[in-house]
Image (cartoon, rainbow, N blue to C red):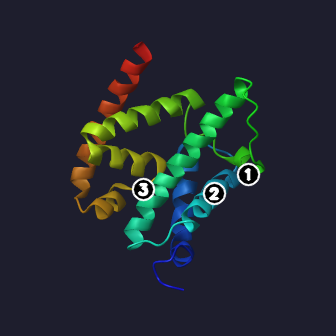
Amino acid sequence: MPADSPDALAETLYPQLRRIARDLHWRYGAGETLRSTALVNECFLKLRASHGFADERHFLRTAARAMRQILINHAQARLTAKRGGGAVLAAFEDDLPDIYWESDERLLALNDALERLAVFAPRLAEIVEYRFFGGYSEREIGDMLDITERTVRRDWTKAKALMLIEMESAEAA
């Protein structure tokens, strides 16, 4: 099995992603450990369909994006079901964490603001994605983006402020 195959990287990095999911779970006050397991496992199902990764950093960046997509899709499906859309959720999706956001509407607003931020500040959007959806530390993000921890900290502060402005302006509209 090639070292950059999803299976090889999954085997090597699974403990790290489990730790990140567990830390996010703890940080946001969740009770069930199965929820972080379900998120990581669903992430790996998405990553297995990939054709390979350049290196571990590429894999971790892709994993953060996959976690974001899983959470956004789950929130959209739950809102559709609430509105009587008849969406049927798979059993494992019922275990996805509610703790990553205040509400499904708030998560979708966050995603929309993140997409708008990516248009004029792609690096800030990446930092939000890696920090919020991937749960990576400032050091890990700095390594992935080849920037210093101080730059990550400064950009994270800017990104949070811009995201809040974007979300508030969207709510006001």
Which of the two discs, 1 and 3, labels the residue nearer the N terminus?
1
Q: Are marks 2 and 3 in contact (CB under 8 Å)?
A: no
Residue 103 in view (yes/no): no
- The label shown at residue 172 is none
Badge 2 marks a residue whose secondary structure is helix
Residue at 76% across / 31% down in the picture? 86
Residue sitting at the far top: 172
Which of the two discs, 2 and 1, labels the residue nearer the N terminus?
2
- In the rendered structure, which amino acid carries the disc numbered 2? Glu
Residue at 38% across / 67% down in the picture? 57
Q: Position of residue 71 (x, y in %)?
A: 57, 44
Q: Are marks 1 and 3 in contact (CB under 8 Å)?
A: no
In the foreground, 51 or 29? 51
- The label shown at residue 92 is 1
- In the rendered structure, which amino acid carries the disc numbered 1? Phe
Q: Position of residue 103 (x, y in %)?
A: 59, 29
Q: Are marks 2 and 1 in contact (CB under 8 Å)?
A: yes
Query: Badge 3 is on which residue?
Result: 136
Q: Is residue 150 positioned above or below 28 on the image? A: below
- The label shown at residue 42 is 2
Q: Position of residue 139 (x, y in %)?
A: 32, 60
How many residues crowd mark 3 within 10 Å: few (<14), some (14–19), many (20+)? many
How many residues crowd mark 1 within 10 Å: few (<14), some (14–19), many (20+)? some
- In the rendered structure, which amino acid carries the disc numbered 3? Tyr
Q: CA distance from mark 2 to mark 3?
A: 18 Å
Residue 141 in view (yes/no): yes
Q: Position of residue 67 (x, y in %)?
A: 53, 52
The answer to which quarter of the image holds residue 75 is top right
In the foreground, 14 or 4? 4
> Which quadrant of the rendered structure holds the C terminus?
top left
